[in-house]
Structure formats: C-alpha cells, structure tokens
Image (spheres, rainbow, N blue to C red):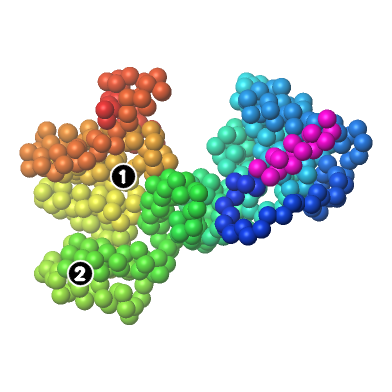
Amino acid sequence: MKNLIRFSLCCIAILSFACTPKTVEKVTEVETPKPAPKEEKITENPCTTLNDLSGAAKEDAETAYVLYRDYIKSKEYDTALSLWKKAYFAAPAANGRIKYQFDDGIKIYKHLYEQSSDNNLQKSYHDTIMAIYDKRAECYPEPGYVEGRKAFDKYYYYSAHSNPNEAYELFKKALDAKGEKADYFVINPMTGILAEKLINEEISIEEGKKYVAIILDAIAYGNANCGNKCQAWEIINSYAPARLENLEGIKGLYDCNYYEKKYLPLLEAEPNNCEIIAKVYGRLLWGDCAPENASVAQAKTAKETHCYTPPPPPGPLRLAFDAYEQGKYIESIQLFEDFVNKTEDLEKKAKYTLLIAKIYYGDLKKFAKARKYALDATKYKSNWGEPYLLIGKLYASSGPLCGPGTGFDSQIVTWPAIDKFEYARKIDPSVSEEATKLINRYKQYMPTREDIFFRSLKVGASFTVPCWIQEKTTIRTVD
C-alpha cells in the first residue's frame, strides 16, 4: 500500500509538470530510467515535506494527500476537509515541488465561506484562506504572485471581511514585484480600484502615474506574450485600456510621451482631417508638450494648412476658443460659461452650453458633468435632439465604467442609450438619420434572452441602470 501511494504521488507531480509547454526534442535513443534513491529529498524547501517525515507519520500524510484529492475532484469539499488538513499540516510543502495543496485548501474554505451565513464563521474562513496564501509564499516564494492572488480574492469574493484599502495595497505590491510581467488576473481589478481612487482624489497624481504606467506596460507585454492566456488578455483589452483612457481628463496624470504615442498616429493616418488635427493638437498641449516639440509643430502646421477658420472677434468667445485650442480645457469651460451667463441670445446659450458638455465628454472624460450641461442646453432650445444624442453616447460609452467591459453589467448601458437616441429622433427630425444609425449600432450589444432569464428578469419590465447613470429604462434583448 505504501509503495502504491508513493507511486500515485509521483504520477500526480509528473502530470502537473506535463501541462507546461515544452520544447520538443528529437529522441535518438531510449534508455531505461534509473530509479531514484528512495529517501532522497527532491528539493530544498523551508517548509516540512513528506521526506522530512518518517514511519507511520509519513505514510498517513501520503495517504491523506492521495485520498483528499479524489474528493476535491468530485467537489465533495466537506468530506475532503479533514483529509486535506491531515496532509497539509503534516507536510505543507508535500514533495517539495507541487503547490496544488494550497489551491485545494483555498477552494475548500471558499466553499465553506459561500455556504455559511454566519458572519463570524465567514470571517474565520476568510482569515484561514489568507493564512494559506501566506504559507504558500513561505514554502514557495514567488514575489508578487501571492499578493496578487490575495488581492484578487479580497476584491471579488471577500470584500465584506476586508478593509477596502487592503486589496489596493496588495495589488500595488504585486505590480511593484512583477512590473510589466504582472499576472493577468491583477490588471482589471487594479485598474478599477486605481481609477476610482484617482477620480476621488484619494491618492496623489504621482502615485497614480506610477501604477498607470506599470499597467499599460503590462498590457503591452501581456498581449505580446499571452501564450495560453490570450483569451484572458482579450477580456482585459475590453476593459482596462478604455478605463485608463477615461482618466485623461485628470491633468498631469499622463505626460507628453503618452499623448504623442497615442494620438500622433491618428494625425498620420488622416493628415487632412480637421477634427482629428484639432484633437491631436489639443491633446498634446493638454499633456504639457512644449510648443517647440516636433509633434506639436507637426499638428500646428497641419492645423494652419488645412483647417484655418477666421477667429471670432475679440471678446469672451475669442478667449474661450483660444484657451480650448491651446489644450486649456478647464479654462475654456469657465470662459464659455461666462459667455453663456452674460448673453441674452438663447440660440447662443444653447450652442455653447452644449459645447461645454462636449468638452466634458470628449476631452475631460467627465460623463456626469457632460450630461448635466447637455440637459441644461435643452432649456434654451426646445425640440432639440442633439443634446440627447450626446447623452446617449455618454451612456453607450460607459460599459468599462459600469462593468468589466463585457457581459451583462456592461451591456445594460445600451438600454438608456437607445432610449435617448429614440427620443432625439422623435422630437427632432433633423437628427433622425444619425439617431437611427446609433440605435442600430448599439442594439447588437444588448444582453441576450439567456442573460435575462439567468438573472430572473423579464423582457419589457422596468429596470434602473446603476453606476453613474441611475436611470430607469425597459429591459430588452438582442435576440
């Protein structure tokens, strides 16, 4: 029995390594492998291994290791627990190489946590899971990996029993340790936490710059070296880049190099497009690129060559447009607002209030502010569809803000977006064509009937979309 168990453990260890991609080599000769010395320690390990035990203690631990795994495979976690404890506490490092015993323990206690409604028990299970992670780090040091795993679990599973900042601090340690080679499971949750902390001014711009830069480098490296994790990186690509882009409205977060790298290719692709030229020129200046910078000079030349328009006469509007063209978005908003407050011309009030909304949306990425000014614009001009088109675009762009970028939580933003497009088309025939195009574009991103059924919802029922939108709508599906 003892030899059979040892043989089973060896097979498990071999199979765990068989999943790792290997370089195929040509085999020219087959030799009969020599048996390893029976009591030779496989590898040095700071934790107790099976080879550190002897006699009945070793045999009992080996037996427990083999038996508890069978229960794990059949998801009989309650039965597996006592056997896992016997194996783990006797020899936490197993044979000195395998690590699955830590994941198995975490899986068991996660099951117990989810099955319990006792807050004290849940707290105890959470603490045990964190202790298992710590033991793994002790037995198999992997700088950054365990911190990332702990942070991930605290963020997604155990937030009720964790300080909100614990996950963030652990994610920071993971990124500090691994840099551009950060584990894929760290990227999306850390991006979400980091964005919220920057928006709420809970951390400094310098701290934000540091970790945004690491995340962007990790995304680039991960996509280039995704291996068997390419599907995971596709999910990351649907969320993290857009979430980080929405932080461009925070002055000083991104430097000139970021804006050059991101926006100059747009100008090179469409050198005569005045909308693109204006955007690139403004972004470079917003990013504090110096006037003598080659990229700024290139954008300025393109603007003067292809997009010259007579400036407004001297006055408040001229100052507002000058500030905007120089990438001084916040100053330009203040100047446009001063003009709106002073003029008696309702048409101009409407026009420039909506322009403020567009700056908040397109340049500063402040969606709630953009909606406020779009709605204010409708007070000056009745039956005007354009402000509602803008609000619809705000909602449709909020998938990465209100969810993971894909899936139900990100798809439901299409419902209020389409509501606004339909309303714009109803009150203003002049925007009917654009509204119809937008409706058709975003209908395909609505949830499926299966998604609705799975969440015990009903097509046609009322639903309030959460996040910053907080708007009542009607449940619809793509099929």
In the image, residue 276 sits, relative to residue 187, either above or below, namely: below
State the residue in front, 370 or 381.
370
Amino acid type, residue under disc 1 in the picture: Ser
In the image, residue 213 sits, relative to residue 141, either above or below, namely: below
Figure label count = 2
Please give the residue where the numbered disc 1 appears in the rendered image: 397
**Looking at the rendering, which quadrant does residue 387 occupy?**
top left
Residue furthest left in the image? 429
Q: Residues within 10 Å of mark 1 (few under 14, many from 20)?
A: some
Distance (Cα) linking label 2 and label 1 = 26 Å
Where residue 359 sits: x, y (%)?
27, 54
Where residue 348 sits: x, y (%)?
13, 52
At mark 1, the secondary structure is: loop
Residue furthest front in the image? 29
Residue 271 marker: 2
At mark 2, the secondary structure is: loop
Residue depicted at x 69% and y 22% = 78
Q: Which residues are magenta?
A: 1-15
Residue depicted at x 74% and y 42% = 10
**Looking at the rendering, which quadrant does residue 181 occupy?**
bottom right
